[in-house]
Amino acid sequence: MFQKKKINIIKKKLSSKKVYIHFIKASEKNKNQRTTNEILDILLNKNFSREDVLISVGGGIVGDIAGYAASLFKRGLNIPTTLLAQVDSSIGGKTGVNTKHGKNLIGSFYQPKLVISDTDFLNTLPKREIICGYGEILKHSLISNKNFFYFLNKH
């Protein structure tokens, strides 16, 4: 339900533009080449050009799929609407899909020129989604360096 609110906000801001909406079920089962191909088919059937943008509205799974499709097609814009997506898939430009052989085995690294993280979207999230994002931040602090971990621990 909260995704529709976010989409309406974006549609209002883009009211002078032609907007096509395609919903995907955000699940690991649908994070695959078939879903990516559906998006690519829409872009090709609607004659998208390099002047057009692909905007994904959602969390990490949606950002991965749409970002991957955009990197294969021409370009894209990711508006991550969960904390996890804001700290992981969008900023790093690491996108991909799953295969029958494993998770995230097909993908691309396509460093975005712009990532929009509207923190107002975080107010719409259930507590569990916020905790997942904090878990990702903690993971990066443990991998990155101890100073980052100490900063998180202190703040």
Image: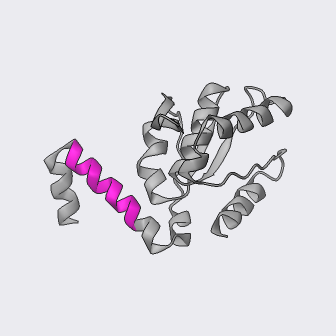
Residue 150 in which image quadrant: bottom left
Provide residue 59's location: percent of width, then percent of height.
54, 54
Residue visible at 27% across and 51% down in the picture: 139
Q: Is residue 99 left or right of residue 12?
A: left
Provide residue 96's location: percent of width, then percent of height.
52, 36
Q: Quick check: can you spot residue 93?
A: no
Residue visible at 78% across and 32% down in the picture: 41
Provide residue 62's location: percent of width, then percent of height.
59, 48
Q: Is residue 139 left or right of residue 3?
A: left
Residue 9 in which image quadrant: bottom right
Locate the C terminus by quadrant: bottom left
Residue visible at 45% across and 59% down in the picture: 83
The residue most toward the bottom is 127
Q: Quick check: can you spot residue 32?
A: yes
Q: Is residue 35 left or right of residue 144?
A: right
Residue visible at 67% across and 26% down in the picture: 74
Provide residue 6's location: percent of width, then percent of height.
66, 62
Q: Nearer the viewer, residue 107 or 101?
A: 101
The range drawn in magenta is 131-143
Tell me: residue 34, above or below residue 58: above
Residue 136 forms part of the magenta stretch: yes
